[in-house]
């Protein structure tokens, strides 16, 4: 966790706030100052016949795209706290996003597309004081958006804002910020999730040896999904690969429970409530859960880019501009 860096950022932001009154200066972090810019990038032009997003057009590589329309977009984030959601009175080193997933549902076809966003993605993030007052906008890791301010809803909305900005200011219709402590709860509700351990976890759990096939139960599931620094090369991309493996193994276990009990998705929702900050209704949440667990609902969109370190040696991910633009087009647009 980045307690020292957050503390230092907050101190610097407060000084700037007092000195220049909400000035719009941007604080660069290492090589991330050039995020989403490239000398060889393809030109992207936009046009809009009114103030609404639905009329926007994008021309990319000589092809004109228009919004698909009839979409619903949701952000799900896993927060690096093992506990239930509580009132925040002081910064305790937790609160960042370990997982960010955008689900785009086409209401006309009931098909979903899934975009996973690396927590270390460098993008513009609003810096907030503890009371939620806007201080500045800074190019930093997107995971830090949820560590700004003390109010849980403010943190959630700040994360939504950062993700929306990254994706070309697309509207996000709903969000669910889930503390990672919920993993073991939901994992055990489906009867455990069976995976083959591809990294050596034996230092943190002797039963999780490399090469073993294990049905994860309780805290094992949380360790498998959350652990990073102690495992393999300590990179987030390694952890994201492991999280994808867990997701694919979780789906059939969830489907089986739904087949046995039609109310199971609702039971999962209620079990997660104490761990979650959301504006998604129980009905909508259950519908999305069923859709995403469908083995045919597996259209994933990815963003490629460059991994690195910032000036404080924290991991960064700088999206490739073309890859990011193509992901946006894949999710939200169609050829005219």
Image (cartoon, helix red, strand yellow):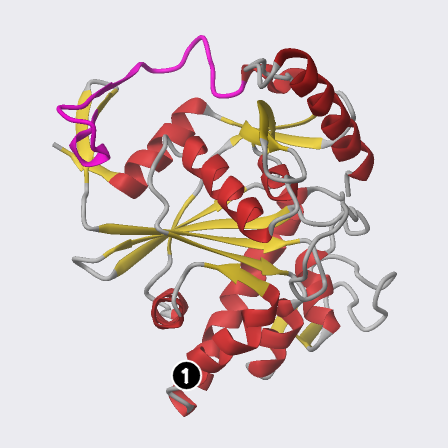
Would you say residue 335 is visible in this rendering? yes
Q: Residue at x 41, y 31 (%)?
A: 324
Quadrant housing residue 220? bottom right
- Up/down of 302 relative to 207, above or below: above
- Quadrant of the image containing the N terminus: top right
Number of numbered callouts drawn: 1
- Horizontally, is 2 left or right of 277 in the view? right
Above or below, 257 against 180 in this view is: below
In this view, 209 is above or below 316: below
Residue 321: image location, x then y, percent? 43, 23
Task: Judge by depth and name the residue closer to the eye, 238 or 285.
Answer: 285
Please give the name of the residue rendered at 42% of the width and 91% of the height, measured from the top-left corner: 260
> Which residue in the structure is indicated by mark 1?
258
Span highlighted in magenta in the image: 35-57
User: Picture coordinates of residue 184 (x, y %)?
Assistant: 66, 72
Q: Is residue 198 above or below residue 265?
A: above
At horizontal 40% and vertical 86% (from top left) the residue drawn is 263
The residue lying furthest to the top in this view is 39
């Amino acid at each position: 966790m980045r307690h020292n860096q957050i503390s230092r950022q907050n101190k610097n932001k407060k000084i700037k706030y007092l000195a220049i009154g909400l000035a719009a200066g941007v604080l660069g972090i290492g090589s991330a100052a050039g995020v989403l810019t490239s000398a060889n990038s393809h030109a992207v032009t936009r046009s809009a016949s009114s103030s609404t997003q639905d009329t926007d057009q994008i021309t990319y590589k000589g092809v004109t795209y228009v919004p698909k329309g009839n979409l619903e977009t949701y952000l799900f984030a896993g927060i690096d706290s093992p506990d239930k959601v509580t009132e925040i009175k002081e910064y305790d080193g937790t609160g960042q996003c370990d997982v960010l997933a955008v689900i785009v549902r086409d209401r006309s076809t009931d098909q979903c597309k899934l975009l996973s966003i690396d927590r270390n993605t460098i993008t513009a993030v609003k810096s907030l004081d503890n009371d939620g007052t806007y201080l500045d906008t800074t190019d930093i890791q997107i995971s830090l958006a949820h560590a700004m301010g003390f109010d849980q809803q403010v943190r959630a909305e700040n994360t939504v804002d950062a993700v929306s900005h990254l994706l070309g200011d697309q509207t996000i219709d709903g969000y669910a910020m889930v503390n990672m402590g919920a993993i073991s709860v939901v994992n055990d509700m489906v009867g455990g999730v069976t995976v083959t351990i591809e990294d050596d976890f034996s230092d943190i759990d002797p039963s999780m040896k490399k090469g073993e096939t294990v049905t994860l139960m309780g805290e094992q599931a949380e360790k498998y999904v959350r652990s990073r620094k102690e495992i393999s090369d300590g990179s987030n991309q390694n952890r994201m690969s492991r999280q994808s493996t867990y997701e694919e193994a979780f789906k059939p276990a969830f489907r089986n429970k739904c087949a046995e009990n039609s109310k199971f998705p609702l039971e999962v929702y209620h079990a997660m409530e104490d761990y979650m900050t959301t504006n998604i209704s129980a009905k909508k949440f259950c519908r999305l859960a069923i859709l995403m667990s469908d083995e045919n609902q597996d259209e994933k969109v990815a963003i490629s880019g460059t991994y690195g370190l910032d000036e404080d040696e924290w991991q960064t991910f700088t999206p490739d501009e073309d890859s990011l633009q193509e992901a946006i087009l894949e999710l939200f647009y169609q050829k005219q």
